[in-house]
Amino acid sequence: MVVLNLAIEYVPSVISEGFTLSLLTALLLKIALELVIVLKNKVIVRLRAATTRRAKAAAALSLWVVAAGSKLVVLELVDLVFGDAVSLGGFIPVTLLVVALLGSRAAVRRLLVDDTPAAT
């Protein structure tokens, strides 16, 4: 939510007509991001398990398709669900938004993980 609203405030091409729409868009982005991460992890497992050049190339191509294609899917999904009320700008702003979302996701997870050894 914070990342999306910062993008709305500072990136002119990212537009939401109101708080409720930005909240729903953030939820949609979170769900899409989590699904893309699951898919990406499955492709990475296939890439690591590949033993032939052809299999590695196919897995690497699949990883590229997931990485690039997910941005296009997000743009279409937002357009389908919210129409003209929400605009994420285009491929470059969505890519930057997704990178920021991934960074904030990782930072929050690091904050929430307890690295201290358990007392025995």
Image (tube, rainbow, N blue to C red):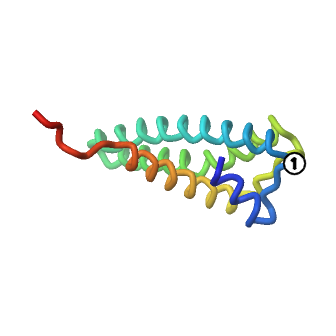
Depth check: 82 or 6 in front?
A: 6
Looking at the rendering, which quadrant does residue 79 occupy? Answer: top right
Work out whether 91 lies above or below 60. Answer: below
Depth check: 100 or 71 in front?
A: 100
Q: Position of residue 84 (x, y in %)?
A: 89, 46
Query: Is 47 displayed left or right of 33 in the figure?
Result: left
Query: Is 34 displayed left or right of 112 in the figure?
Result: right
Q: Position of residue 69 (x, y in %)?
A: 62, 47
Q: Position of residue 61 (x, y in %)?
A: 48, 49
Depth check: 57 or 34 in front?
A: 34
Query: Is 42 displayed left or right of 98 in the figure?
Result: left
Type of the residue with mark 1: Glu
Residue wearing tag 1: 17
Please tell me which residue is depicted at 17% across the width and 37% down the height of the picture: 118
Query: In the structure shown, which secondary structural element does the residue marked by tag 1 occupy?
Result: loop
Name the quarter where the C terminus is drawn: top left
Q: Position of residue 115 (x, y in %)?
A: 25, 46
Please tell me which residue is depicted at 74% across the width and 66% down the height of the picture: 10
Q: Residue furthest right?
A: 84
